[in-house]
Amino acid sequence: MRIAAGLPHETRVIENVFVPMRDGARLAARIWLPVDAEKRPVPAVLEYIPYRKRDGTRVRDAANHPYLAGHGYVCARVDMRGSGDSDGVLTDEYRPQEHEDAEDVIAWLAEQEWCDGNVGMMGISWGGFNSLQVAARRPPALKAIVSASATDDLYVDNMHYMGGCLLGDNLSEATVMFAANSQPPDPEIVGEGWRDLWRERLEGSGLWLDTWLSHQRRDDYWKPASVCEDYSQVQVPVMAVGGWADGYTNAVFRLLEHLDVPRKGLIGPWGHKYPHFGVPGPAIGFLQELVRWWDHWLKGIDSGLMDEPMLRAWMQDSVAPKPSYADRPGRWVGEDSWPSPDVERRQYRLRRHGIEHGDVRAEAGTDVTLQSPLSVGMFAGKWASYAATPDLPFDQREEDGGALVFEMEPLGETMEIFGLPVASFEVSADKPVAMLAVRLSDVAPNGEATRFTYGLLNLTHRDGSAKPRPLEPGERYRVDVPLNGIAQSIPAGHRLRLSVSTSYWPLAWPAPEAATVRFTAGSSSLTLPVRPPRAEDEKLREFGEPEIAEPLAVTQLEPGEHHWRVTRDLATGVSTLAIADDQGSQRLEETGTVLRRGTWERYSFRWNDVNSVRGETRTVRRFERGDWRVEVVTRTVLSSTSENFLITAQLDAYELDASRGDPRVYSQNWRREIPRDLV
């Protein structure tokens, strides 16, 4: 990482300005701009998220936005309504109010004397989502967007559900927002009314997990903010960015295929991070790429970016399985269009003893039955890796004992897979609800197995997720299981392994009853997108070294702790995955604010009882500066029976003032019972 010095423009920062909304509410913005922007207006770039500009994203913002401002842009980091120092209460994600406010912010930016009227929008995760969603509303001043680690389909490809299966990350994300929505504004920004605004949030934000679990199929709750409903609504250029270690990669392929605007795709080896902070590496000079993108679309400067391939992706080399990597070896490859005519859809038949290429006839008597133990999935890692290591999948030999396994003979030459594989099966089940988890692994000659992609399917969603239908026990069905997109090189002498299980806890919540699934192996297949190496890839322009602006001064006051522990108590039969993401306490020297942040997750089951599965999360968020000391503590537990999901949650807020008798200023408990809807 290089600290950029001597940027083309001298800059200044406006710590806070309130942007007026059409209904009278005010959103808090932090703005970086060239010092002469009032005399020489420049385009503006908006990042609009609910994660507290004053402290929550201050370190990242200090690396990113002054860099872009130093290249001749106004950068605005705006707290969404109900977050940070803005007015209001945030009650859910991606709702119309959020998008309407974004339109008002964009119009306000375009009207300022330091802006030339052209606005771009960028973001990662939530900010990547709403950049796409706001673009579909076509605010006149918005001229281009950058969407990183996002999706075009809120149900099908999001951390709530995957293939109709409830994800464990649904609980994780609900916990993140439970904590975020309960945090107070900063008194130095909003003044004496901060307590009133804090109480509004504590009382009004609600329990989002309740909402998300009340929509277990792809209904009208998920559709309005899913741009895949009508790609033609997006009429500005789009840069879509993802990482193979993240959960948000498939949308890059779909956006390139379905949008009819200038577009670029970039997929690296990274987790849920901007590419200049990318882990696993190599990280790249992403801010330099953003300057080229914004120069082209906001300033009309030919930066050469649009002459390069539509899609650039990191072709990963074979590696031994590890739950974390500093770097993934490989090389960059490029495609001028997507889908690419250079990628062959190659079909393989699954037979009792392996995977064979070509039109292989079905074998007689090849039905195989499977009911996986709940332990399959304990080494799966996170749906989306946040680089809170170790959160990547471990050696798949730990999982394959409870799976149905198909394996190729050792490869005679290197095979490179690039795109979205699909596994197809003929199956029946003995219960009305059952699931499949399908994994592809690179198996080394010594037997080590590295998972490189996977997919999930709730079999009641076999014909789509809008109208799931229960299985008729014993009836056979043809089903397709889409796997996540990937670019993976498998060397000669290695084997490709396909593993199928009927559970994948805690990455996915198990079916209401333990189901036995029968497979007709000879009637099942695997379709791989195979791309031969091309000499043109060696001529691709190299990305620069990661650059950032001068980093924010931060002092670590108390150490953090990160662990990922799998345990099994043979006396009680309880198996547990315990995760700690404790960041300790840090002081932001620029403001003097001390932050204490920690999140703990615990997932368990007893023996193989699907109704014993339990997820529990706890968070602590503390803010201190002078005599201002506040803390928010949350706890959420999700369990289930064969008929219902059960939620218990607790929120406690404290003002840690020695003059107060009871420091707790707010407490609320929730208990919810939500019927299972074929999930």
Image: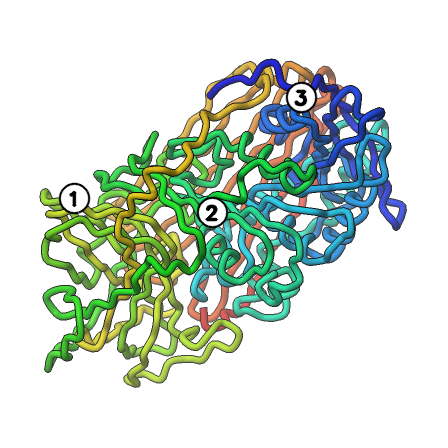
> Which residue in the protein does label 1 denote?
448
Q: Secondary structure at mark 3?
A: strand
- Give whichever of 473, 52 is nearer the camera: 52
- Give whichever of 629, 595 is nearer the camera: 595
Q: Amino acid type of disc 3?
A: Glu
- Name the residue: 56% across, 18% down: 4
- Name the residue: 38% across, 66% down: 457
Can residue 181 be seen here? The reply is no
Q: Secondary structure at mark 2?
A: strand
Can residue 627 be seen here? The reply is yes
**Percent of width and height locating residue 319:** 23, 39
Q: Secondary structure at mark 1?
A: loop
**Percent of width and height locating residue 329:** 29, 35
> Which residue in the protein does label 2 denote?
616
> Which residue in the protein does label 3 denote?
624
The residues tagged by marks 1 and 3 sit, at their Cα atoms, a distance apart of 48 Å
- Give whichever of 332, 122 is nearer the camera: 332
Toward which corner of the image does residue 538 lie, by quadrant? top left
